[in-house]
Image: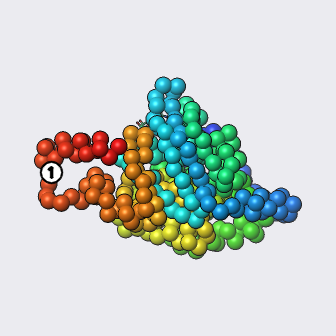
Amino acid sequence: MARFCAQPLGTGPLYPTAALLVAHVEQLHDAPRALHCSTMATVAATRVDEMVSGNVLSIKNIEVIYDHVILVLKGVSLEVPEGSIVALLGANGAGKTTTIKSVSNILGTERGEVTKGSIEYMGERVENLSPSDLVERGVVQVMEGRHCFEHLTVEDNLLTGAYIRKESRRVIADELEKVYAYFPRLKLRRKSQAGYTSGGEQQMIAVGRALMAKPKLILLDEPSMGLAPQLVEEIFEIVKQLNETENVTFLLAEQNTSIALRYASYGYILENGRVVMDGIASALAENEDVKEFYLGISEGSKKSFRDVKSYRRRKRWLA
Ligand code: ATP
């Protein structure tokens, strides 16, 4: 059984078993694959049909409960327009990951469920779709913690992302080259075991693997986590390029408000399972409360305990 970089890659139907993925990679290496033209045509037609203008994702008033009792999301609504980068901001435990997992429908693996509200992807209700169906439709989550198969090479990790795709080996190979064009560093390390790559490279593997699934919407959870500022900038630059060049839409959960607001067009701030503020990213970055509470910029110098009390008061006002 596969071992993973930091934690297990994931469980449940979104993730085929490690053995299956490894078999798939081996198949790509060794066996010629038939070109499933009819399947490709069907998939392409479905994608074209789905290309409606407006929002790729629309979450309406969802509630999420873990273990039947722990109410975590208390009526979250948000919209992600096609071709945009939308930031989902908030401190630890605000509910960002839970929101993202609600969309990719993997809450069940943690005894969580959406108990109220609706989630629409390309204008269609998707709460009842399986995670793998969602991946096939182009919704791909890059989990917090940049999970990868540590015993596989960088290249084989990327190839596992193409698991759901029915195209020929040649098409997949072209796609791989495209990923390498975005992440030249991965090409240099393609034969290295993923477990021995750096944190930044593992984050690149995680995003590159998502790209191999030909996503329309990437749910990117905390890409900056544990990375040096320069690498964080590099990752966000690639996100921007993918958004502009490949027309991939991003819902980006981030604690690093500063960088997220620089790259996103719109932002939502979550606190304690509720959206407490949303707006155009540049306006949020200039908002005095956002500056004070999330960007660490305040008029005057260090805060005293008195300021902490007023911070709490103002936070209530925010909500
Ligand atoms: P972080 O940035 O630290 O990941 P977050 O904003 O992504 O935080 P979530 O991970 O969504 O927040 O967690 C929101 C709340 O839900 C937290 O209070 C957390 O303890 C709780 N929670 C998350 N997962 C579970 C679970 N499987 N069972 C019970 N409670 C959970």
Whether residue 202 appears in this view of the structure is: no
| Residue depicted at x 52% and y 56% | 251
Q: Is residue 100 above or below residue 177?
A: above
| Residue depicted at x 57% and y 38% | 117
Is 23 on the left-hand or right-hand side of 118? Answer: right
| Residue depicted at x 77% and y 63% | 44
Q: Classify the position of the N terminus by image quarter.
A: top right
Q: How is the image coloured?
A: rainbow
Q: Position of residue 7 (x, y in %)?
A: 50, 44
Ligand 1 picture quarter:
top left
Q: Position of residue 166 (x, y in %)?
A: 78, 58
Q: Quick one: SS at disc 1?
A: loop
Identify the residue position indicated by label 1 in the image: 303
In front: 158, or 39?
39
Q: Residues within 10 Å of mark 1 (few under 14, many from 20)?
A: few
Q: Quadrant of residue 35?
A: bottom right
Q: Quadrant of residue 178?
A: bottom right
> Which residue occupies the extreme front position in the image?
317
Q: Is residue 167 above or below residue 74?
A: below
> Which residue occupies the extreme top position in the image?
69
